[in-house]
Image (tube, grey):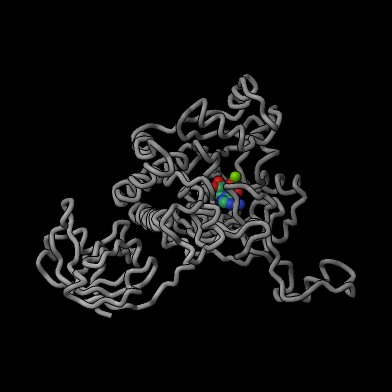
């Protein structure tokens, strides 16, 4: 169907003024009288809509064309809008592509996000989701551009894997056979399975990313990760998109600088490339959002040592649900207190106790902590998990033995420490959490096309 994208007409009106154009789209709202009808058309190519003006005395129009949700093709002249300084289309002909009966669940009055979650296949046609998913797309493009421009190689790590990177036992099993009591042991059972051993969906591309970084120096992955976490919260998904750069010859302060630089680059790109969407979020989702984000772009992130963070939390005049003491994991409530009340901006918490972090993190000289950091942001908590990696074979082996890990399934990973080992670091950014942060959306299910979480696979 030959037609023009509405975004082209609205962005370069001078190119189209006085000319005839064909547009296709869905009727978002309409006003209809016996003499004229006004249709607000959206084709989803931008946040704004194009108004079609129909002189009902001059042309015959199927009444179905003016119904909310109907899809139509309009041909006509692009003219200066009667109101405001934009343009509209003076319809010479309107044809119906698909009618939309009155039971269409997306109605004019603002429906709740909760209700819209029950119709994931239709909710994308609302303003909110139109804006969310364009911002998500622009952010993804900016992430690729950032890494590409800085000499990173984009690698695609496997989704099916035999090794559990985070070692937290949160892997979904991949199998072609049901359990059968005839097998004497778990091992014998998996021997008969598709891969001849236990396999699962990857929780992180990091281990394979490290392999690639030992050849290309700078790599990143951008793909799905899976977590069988039984966490029914507004920031956890069973399937999320994960950006994981891995950088050779980089220590913890170097990778933190990269993380901060990348976050700022992508926020700026979204602010500049999505002005209409960001104004919408600023008005309807989080007042002051744009100012907040510009402030983030233009100021330094905070940095606090884990040990100091614990002291701050202990002195806090707040009743936390989880008690705080040196050695404890920092819970979401603590993360949010640190970043929302104490620092009021993104903050890196560095040097966590080694016992609560993963085996691959570089052990600090104090023997108690690792060179790891989480980046916390207001409203969400952790959006990045980051560390320098242990490059010393003996220390790495010791950390794995302490955790009773099956060393035989990490042979390739360990080889990296035998053949030309170098200091290196990396991080993982949860893409959905980042999109929540820049849009002000409060539930991770509302920044994901079809969210998967405990008990939910609609
Ligand atoms: O902190 P995590 O578990 O770190 C890793 O996986 C490392 N291997 C990353 C690396 O160093 N390459 O996860 C990284 C980030 C978290 O900070 C969070 O933003 C996101 O991934 N994330 C989730 N997002 C949504 N739902 C979940 N269930 C998530 N689990 C982690
Ligand atoms: Mg983490």
Frontmost residue, 109 versus 129? 109
**Residue 144 in view:** no
Question: Which corner quadrant of the image does residue 178 belong to?
Answer: bottom right
Q: Residue at x 58, y 56 (%)?
A: 204
Residue at 55% x, 39% y is: 381
Number of marks? 0
Query: Residue 307: image x %, image y %?
Result: 61, 26
Nearest the eye: 260 or 212: 260
Name the residue rendered at 50%, 66% in the picture: 121
Q: Residue 230: x, y in percent?
A: 70, 52
| Of the pair 259 and 342, the residue shown nearer to us | 342
Q: Quadrant of residue 323?
A: top right
Quadrant of ligand 2: it is top right
Instruction: Residue 99: give x, y in percent of width and height.
Output: 39, 75
Vertical relation: 285 (above or below) 302: below
Q: Residue furthest left?
A: 18
Q: Is residue 15 above or below residue 292?
A: below
Tell me the quarter of the image containing the N terminus. bottom left
């Amino acid at each position: 169907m030959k037609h023009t994208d509405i975004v082209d007409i609205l962005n370069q009106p001078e190119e189209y003024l006085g000319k005839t154009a064909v547009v296709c789209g869905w009727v978002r709202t309409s006003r209809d009288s016996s003499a004229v009808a006004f249709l607000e058309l959206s084709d989803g190519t931008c946040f704004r809509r194009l108004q079609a003006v129909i002189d009902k005395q001059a042309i015959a129009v199927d009444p179905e064309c003016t119904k909310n949700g109907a899809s139509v093709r309009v041909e006509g002249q692009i003219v200066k809008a009667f109101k405001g300084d934009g343009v509209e289309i003076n319809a010479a002909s309107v044809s119906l592509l698909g009618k939309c009966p009155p039971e269409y669940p997306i109605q004019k009055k603002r429906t709740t996000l909760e209700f819209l979650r029950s119709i994931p296949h239709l909710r994308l046609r609302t303003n909110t989701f139109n804006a969310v998913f364009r911002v998500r797309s622009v952010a993804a493009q900016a992430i690729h551009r950032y890494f590409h421009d800085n000499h990173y190689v984009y690698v695609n790590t496997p989704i099916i894997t035999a090794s559990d990177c985070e070692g937290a036992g949160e892997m979904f099993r991949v199998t072609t056979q049901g359990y059968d009591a005839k097998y004497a042991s778990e091992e014998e059972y998996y021997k008969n399975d598709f891969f001849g051993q236990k396999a699962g969906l990857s929780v992180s591309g990091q281990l394979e990313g490290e392999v690639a970084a030992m050849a290309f120096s700078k790599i990143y992955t951008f793909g799905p990760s899976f977590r069988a976490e039984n966490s029914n919260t507004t920031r956890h998904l069973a399937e999320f998109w994960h950006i994981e750069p891995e950088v050779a010859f980089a220590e913890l302060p170097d990778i933190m600088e990269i993380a901060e630089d990348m976050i700022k680059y992508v926020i700026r790109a979204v602010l500049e490339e999505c002005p209409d969407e960001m104004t919408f979020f600023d008005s309807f989702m989080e007042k002051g959002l744009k100012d907040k984000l510009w402030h983030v772009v233009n100021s330094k992130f905070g940095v606090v040592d884990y040990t100091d963070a614990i002291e701050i939390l202990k002195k806090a005049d707040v009743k936390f649900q989880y008690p705080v003491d040196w050695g404890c994991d920092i819970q979401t409530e603590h993360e949010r207190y640190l970043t929302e009340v104490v620092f009021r901006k993104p903050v890196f918490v560095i040097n966590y106790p080694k016992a609560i972090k993963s085996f691959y993190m570089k052990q600090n000289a104090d023997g108690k902590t690792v060179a790891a950091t989480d980046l916390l942001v207001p409203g969400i908590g952790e959006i990045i998990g980051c560390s320098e990696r242990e490059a010393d074979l003996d220390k790495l082996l010791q950390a794995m033995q302490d955790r009773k890990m099956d060393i035989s399934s990490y042979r390739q990973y360990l080889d990296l420490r035998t053949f030309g080992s170098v200091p290196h670091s990396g991080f993982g950014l949860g893409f959905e959490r980042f999109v929540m942060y820049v849009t002000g959306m409060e539930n991770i299910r509302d920044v994901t096309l079809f969210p998967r979480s405990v008990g939910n696979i609609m």
